[in-house]
Image (cartoon, rainbow, N blue to C red):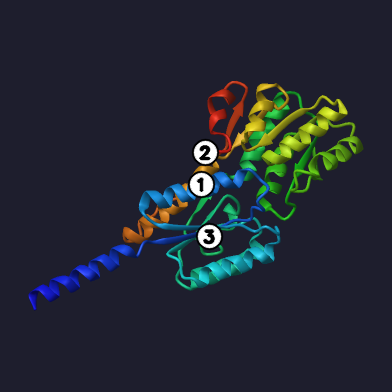
């Protein structure tokens, strides 16, 4: 009888050990932006570090109603926690509130800082986007910019609009829709640049946008102050070549990594949680430090 009880205890312990935590990350990336694979890698690395299972879901259509459905579907599987980007609080807020109402701890990341608490999230990990835009604009003005175009790839995304609006506090700025498709960005950018010959500065709010816009600038033979957001190997090359003055680094690997770690601590440490949101940026990468981070661009930065 004693041997039987010991054997049963061993089975129970083994079964318990086999039940790993499971975390799901849902983002608005459409699969075209080199930013998001680094976020995904951060989440995968964090899950591996704590022995959890991890699933990454993105929204190929770019449609916010589709993303809301993905959040609801993920919540229905009852994961131990969810990490969700929040580019459109009006479209996504109810799906997140429903997940929280079902007892699933949620941490928002990347976009939606101002609405994170309202939708019931535990905290937010990401860059204060308006502040980042202000920093970019202040430096552009100091470097001679007087009139700008801000190329934005997702008109619905409050974070991207905040970048442009923050920049505009220092440099008068018009918005220009670049699209999110690398194949069409150069053509759209060229049309906007030709329609606004008075501008002397450009802000591109994504790394693939930065590449496409710079292609248009080169083809038109223009000379403008060009600054960008986020890192990729081509962006690093353009900075080192003197074509792009700087890019804003929001350390997206942290945006993928830290929420999973925080959820793990919350679930296993009797509600352990940082006392505030975690700002992952902004930081400047320019010609003075581009070489030191170039190897990490598109991998861990």
Q: Is residue 61 above or below residue 94?
A: above
Q: Residue at x 16, y 71 (%)?
A: 7
Query: Residue 207 placed where, x, y %?
Result: 67, 39
Can residue 126 be seen in this snapshot?
no
User: Regarding mark 3 in the picture, which secondary structure is present there?
Assistant: loop
Task: Identify the element where label 1 is drawn.
Answer: helix
For the point 65% across and 22% down, the residue is 240
Q: CA distance from mark 2 to mark 3?
A: 28 Å
Q: Earlier in the sequence, mark 1 or mark 3?
A: 1
Quarter of the picture holding the N terminus: bottom left
Residue at image mark 2: 300
Q: Nearer the viewer, mark 2 or mark 3?
A: 2
Compare residues 205 and 134 and report the one nearer the observer: 205
Q: In the drawing, does residue 263 fall left or right of residue 11? A: right
Q: Nearer the viewer, mark 1 or mark 3?
A: 1
> Can you identify the residue that label 1 sits on?
41
Q: Is residue 253 left or right of residue 20?
A: right
Residue of label 3? 117
């Amino acid at each position: 009888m004693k041997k039987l009880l010991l054997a049963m205890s061993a089975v129970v312990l083994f079964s318990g050990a086999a039940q790993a935590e499971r975390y799901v990350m849902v983002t608005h990336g459409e699969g075209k932006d080199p930013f998001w694979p680094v976020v995904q890698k951060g989440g995968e690395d964090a899950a591996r570090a704590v022995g959890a299972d991890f699933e990454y879901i993105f929204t190929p259509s770019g449609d916010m109603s589709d993303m809301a459905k993905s959040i609801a579907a993920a919540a229905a599987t009852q994961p131990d926690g969810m990490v969700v980007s929040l580019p459109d609080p009006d479209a996504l807020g109810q799906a997140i509130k429903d997940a929280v109402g079902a007892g699933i701890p949620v941490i928002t990341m990347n976009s939606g800082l101002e609405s994170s608490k309202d939708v019931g999230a535990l905290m937010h990990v990401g860059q204060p986007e308006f502040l980042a835009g202000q920093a970019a604009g202040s430096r552009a003005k100091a470097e001679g910019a007087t009139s700008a175009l801000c190329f934005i790839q997702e008109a619905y995304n409050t974070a991207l609009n905040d970048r442009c609006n923050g920049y505009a506090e220092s440099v008068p700025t018009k918005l220009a829709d670049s699209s999110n498709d690398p194949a069409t960005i150069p053509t759209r950018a060229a049309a906007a640049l030709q329609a606004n010959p008075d501008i002397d500065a450009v802000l591109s709010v994504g790394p693939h946008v930065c590449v496409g816009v710079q292609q248009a600038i080169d083809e038109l033979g223009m000379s403008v102050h060009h600054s960008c957001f986020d890192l990729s190997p081509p962006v690093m090359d353009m900075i080192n070549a003197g074509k792009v003055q700087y890019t804003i680094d929001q350390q997206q690997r942290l945006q993928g990594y830290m929420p999973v770690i925080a959820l793990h601590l919350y679930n296993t440490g009797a509600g352990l949680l940082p006392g505030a949101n975690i700002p992952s940026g902004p930081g400047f990468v320019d010609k003075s430090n581009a070489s030191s981070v170039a190897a990490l661009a598109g991998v861990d930065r």
